[in-house]
């Protein structure tokens, strides 16, 4: 059977037209001498190959692989309303097929909604732009998709509205259980129509992307940009980069969000999400976990940069419908992230210096059994900025228990770690640099069990002030080792605390581990020329003193160790 190399004819400038209906192969007389014209009838039955050769295939088969919106009347001239043509192309596409948008600017006058799982593809986020005058695109799979995945790639979703509509809404209602991702988003841009002209834009999406019941979805190389402002102040609308509701296992890989009020909003029964290698810049809150529903656990955030005004990561607790019982998210991980407190202006700048917000916190979480490690927190604001007076904190755990916080660098951000409202946490290897003594104070830096390794104040410079809690109970630390070498600080000091109702007594008992030898002595031993020393304070116990043991201190003065009637 003869084949017609259509692409070759096109490259020679020969147009292909249809004048009469006849079956391929076309007779030799079909080529008009000198006219550069090939007349084909039933073009769908014409067999074609690529220029490089390969297996001949019917032209209709090749056309059917992609549903081209221009075949349904789209002009992509930036003026014509291409919405009806795009809707028609999507309607024709079968489940799992791809609707193709060649390069151009497609203006869309009204919302496009489909209940089929179809894929959308352009020629690149810089080349294929969809300009929406109102609501954006919605793919709503109302029934089980049967394992199909919608892939949306290489497109720009541009808003020509002022913080009113959603750019891309993706809803799936798959049955529970292992399944492929509901949606894959790749190489997409979301911003206002006028940002591309390099002027201060006024258009933006209220929500760029909304995922609902979209389990296992993947967002890769996504760029989201809100409205350009003279500063990050005055969010006139509650703009959101990505909203995720009732979804499990969503992956955000290299998703960059700029100039929206909330970078990511996670709500409902959502768990197992992962953020990797992205940024949230010029936002009020980077990631906000809000109105969660049990269970909502196992979130992972790694290698993300947050430059925000109020919170980098904010995870709230929620009520589970059992009276006043409060639930917190569990088994979360935050690692290798950078947090920068962002400057703001106007009425929002309520700090002491008037250049930032009070009570800034890089990480504020209600969580249990979670880890926060290898994070750097910075406030590089100048002038009269006083994070200590503004009640700023680096990490604040306001509910939960049994968390591990380690390897934290906190520079001029107020209290480095505050776990006062959380229980039984381990805090290790925290470095805090501040310009004021109140920032570097041990009481401020340490609000729970753990140690503070290095601090720096304006007056004293760098100091080693390790406070290592060896053992603690819910009421507080029981045994603590202080190994500090700073000015006026104790060196190698062991402290024992009373945690019972009677705060007057701290008992030290000698016994074997298995209590097989309960009648053991307690020996205070010195090494070499060392001395056994006691403090200068008199006993405060109300028990009767029956005698004293005299001990000479290092200077030769006689010290008295009281013997009392009752020992607890």
Image (cartoon, rainbow, N blue to C red):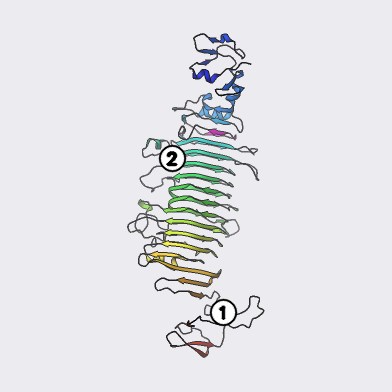
Indicate whether 329 appears above or below 212.
below
Magenta-drawn stretch contains 406 = no
Identify the secondary structure beneath mark 2.
loop
Task: Kindly identify which residue carries mark 1.
Answer: 508
Furthest residue to the front?
A: 528
Queried whether the magenta region covers residue 115, the answer comes back as yes
Count of numbered circles on the image:
2
- Residue reaching furthest to the left: 383
Q: Position of residue 431 (x, y in %)?
A: 44, 62
Residue 466 image position (x, y, % from top left) = 47, 68
Q: Which residues are magenta?
A: 112-132
Real-space Cα separation, disc 1 to disc 2, in angstroms: 67 Å
Q: Is label 1 or label 2 in front?
A: 1
Quadrant in which the N terminus appears: top right
Check residue 550 in the rendering and tell me which mark sits there, or answer none: none
Q: Which part of the image, by quadrant, shows the C terminus?
A: bottom right
Task: Determine contact: label 1, label 2, CB under 8 Å.
Answer: no
């Amino acid at each position: 059977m003869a084949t017609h190399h259509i692409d070759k004819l096109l490259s020679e400038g020969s147009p292909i037209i249809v004048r009469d209906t006849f079956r391929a192969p076309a007779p030799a007389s079909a080529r008009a001498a000198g006219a550069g014209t090939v007349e084909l009838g039933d073009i769908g039955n014409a067999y074609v190959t690529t220029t490089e050769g390969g297996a001949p295939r019917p032209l209709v088969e090749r056309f059917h692989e992609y549903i081209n919106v221009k075949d349904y009347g789209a002009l992509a001239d930036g003026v014509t309303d291409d919405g009806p043509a795009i809707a028609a192309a999507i309607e024709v596409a079968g489940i799992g097929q791809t609707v193709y948008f060649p390069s151009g600017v497609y203006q869309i006058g009204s919302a496009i909604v489909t209940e089929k799982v179809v894929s959308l593809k352009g020629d690149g986020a810089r080349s294929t732009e969809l300009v929406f005058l109102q609501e954006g695109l919605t793919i709503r799979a109302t029934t089980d998709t049967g394992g199909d995945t919608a892939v949306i790639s290489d497109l720009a979703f541009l808003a020509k509205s002022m913080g009113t509509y959603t750019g891309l809404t993706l809803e799936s209602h798959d049955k529970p259980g292992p399944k492929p991702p509901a949606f894959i988003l790749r190489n997409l841009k979301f911003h206002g129509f006028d940002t591309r002209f390099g002027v201060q834009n006024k258009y933006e999406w209220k929500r760029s992307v909304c995922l609902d019941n979209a389990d296992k979805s993947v967002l890769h190389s996504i760029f989201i940009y809100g409205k350009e402002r003279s500063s990050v102040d005055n969010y006139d609308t509650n703009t959101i980069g990505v909203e995720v509701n009732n979804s499990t296992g969503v992956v955000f890989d290299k998703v960059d969000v700029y100039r929206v009020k909330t970078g990511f909003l996670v709500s409902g029964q959502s768990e197992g999400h992962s953020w990797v290698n992205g940024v949230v810049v010029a936002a009020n809150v980077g990631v906000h976990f809000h109105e969660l529903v049990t269970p909502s656990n196992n979130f992972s955030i790694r290698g993300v940069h947050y430059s925000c005004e109020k919170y980098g990561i904010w995870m709230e607790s929620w009520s589970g419908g059992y009276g006043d019982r409060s639930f917190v998210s569990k088994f979360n991980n935050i690692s290798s992230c950078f947090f920068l407190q962002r400057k703001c202006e106007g009425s929002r700048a309520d700090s002491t210096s008037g250049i930032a917000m009070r009570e800034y916190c890089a990480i504020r979480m209600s969580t249990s059994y979670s880890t926060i490690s290898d994070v750097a927190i910075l406030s590089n604001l100048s002038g009269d900025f006083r994070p200590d007076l503004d009640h700023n904190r680096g990490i604040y755990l306001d509910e939960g228990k049994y968390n591990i916080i380690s390897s934290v660098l906190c520079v001029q951000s107020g209290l480095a770690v505050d776990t006062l409202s959380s229980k039984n946490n381990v805090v290790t290897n925290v470095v805090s640099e501040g310009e004021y003594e109140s920032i570097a104070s041990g009481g401020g830096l340490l609000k729970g069990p753990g140690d503070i390794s290095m601090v720096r104040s304006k007056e004293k410079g760098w100091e080693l002030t390790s406070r290592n809690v060896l053992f603690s109970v819910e009421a507080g630390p029981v045994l603590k080792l202080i190994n500090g070498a700073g000015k006026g600080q104790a060196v190698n000091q062991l402290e024992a605390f009373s945690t019972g109702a009677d705060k007057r007594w701290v008992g030290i008992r000698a016994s074997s581990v298995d209590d097989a030898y309960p009648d053991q002595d307690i020996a205070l031993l010195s090494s070499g020329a060392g001395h056994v020393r006691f403090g200068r304070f008199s006993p405060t116990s109300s028990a009767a003193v029956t005698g004293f043991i005299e001990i000479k201190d290092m200077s030769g003065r006689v010290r008295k160790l009281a013997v009392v009637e009752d020992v607890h």
